[in-house]
Amino acid sequence: MILTVGNTKGGVGKTTLAINITIARALSGSDVLLVDGDEQHTAITFTELRNSLLGKTGYTAVSLHGAALRTQVRQLSSKYADIVIDVGGRNTGSLRAALTVTDVLLVPVQPRSFDIWAVDQVVALIQEAREINPTMRAVAMLNAADAQGNDNKGALDALRDIESIELLEFSIGRRKAFPNAASAGRAVIEQSPKDPKAIEELTAILNAIYS
Ligand SMILES: Nc1ncnc2c1ncn2[C@@H]1O[C@H](COP(=O)(O)OP(=O)(O)OP(=O)(O)O)[C@@H](O)[C@H]1O
Ligand SMILES: [Mg+2]
């Protein structure tokens, strides 16, 4: 399955989710290809850090952009059963390319109004992509959600109203375990001390996407 983690909004947790999903899939026995479609190369930088700290990564990572992302991912999909694509938050060129080949688009959204408004742009891209890729599944979820307050409910209500995107009722909270694990070259499921809540939330998202 090809999964793209994408949003035109920056800093919503795309790379964090992409690397955590990649490592979780790899640990469950899949041969995973992580495609870094962001010119900032954050996923590649993370992978290099992981390799230098742990001596191995457990997955293959490549950097691909624009039209090459589309053609190469098409080619590589016969070699890898599991492909995870991380795209950047600004340039939509690689996001557009990814949407033409992906099976699932996961849209992380932070429960703040600017982030919710930006989803309209993603909806337009999804509609455009479905003309070429009509079976693409698009799912949204809250990431870095507040522990309490009304913002989460407001954001979920706004997302539920969007027809072209399915809303996952599972959210990931704002948890220090994510940046902590990333700076150690790890996913939250590998990090000790363990954060059971972060692991539980990530597992719920994985089950919703891969079941
Ligand atoms: N659930 C979370 N809890 C706490 N911090 C998080 C969470 N998700 C992401 N972050 C942090 O938020 C910051 C931005 O995350 P990340 O780089 O994954 O976003 P991005 O969408 O890939 O950004 P860009 O658009 O620049 O590619 C990072 O410091 C990351 O550690
Ligand atoms: Mg990123």
Image (spheres, helix red, strand yellow):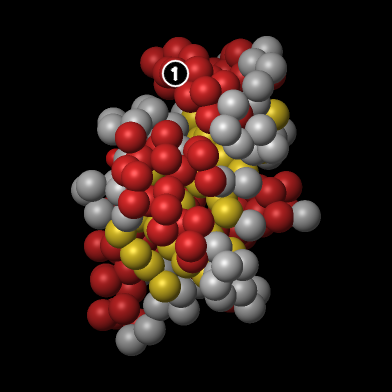
- Residue farthest to the left? 40
Quarter occupied by the C terminus: bottom right
In the image, 4 versus 143, the foreground residue is: 4
Residue 81's place in the image compared with 199, above or below, is below
Which percent across, then down, holds residue 123?
53, 20
Residue 126 figure quarter: top right
Residue 8 figure quarter: top left
Q: Does residue 107 appear left or right of residue 47 in this picture?
A: right
Which percent across, then down, holds residue 138?
63, 34
Residue at x 71% of width, y 33% of height: 169
In the image, 9 versus 38, the foreground residue is: 38
Residue 151's place in the image compared with 147, above or below, is above
The amino acid on which the numbered mark 1 sits, given as a three-letter code, is Gln
Residue 83's place in the image compared with 7, above or below, is below
Identify the secondary structure beneath mark 1: helix
What residue is shown with label 1? 121
Which percent across, then down, holds residue 197?
61, 53
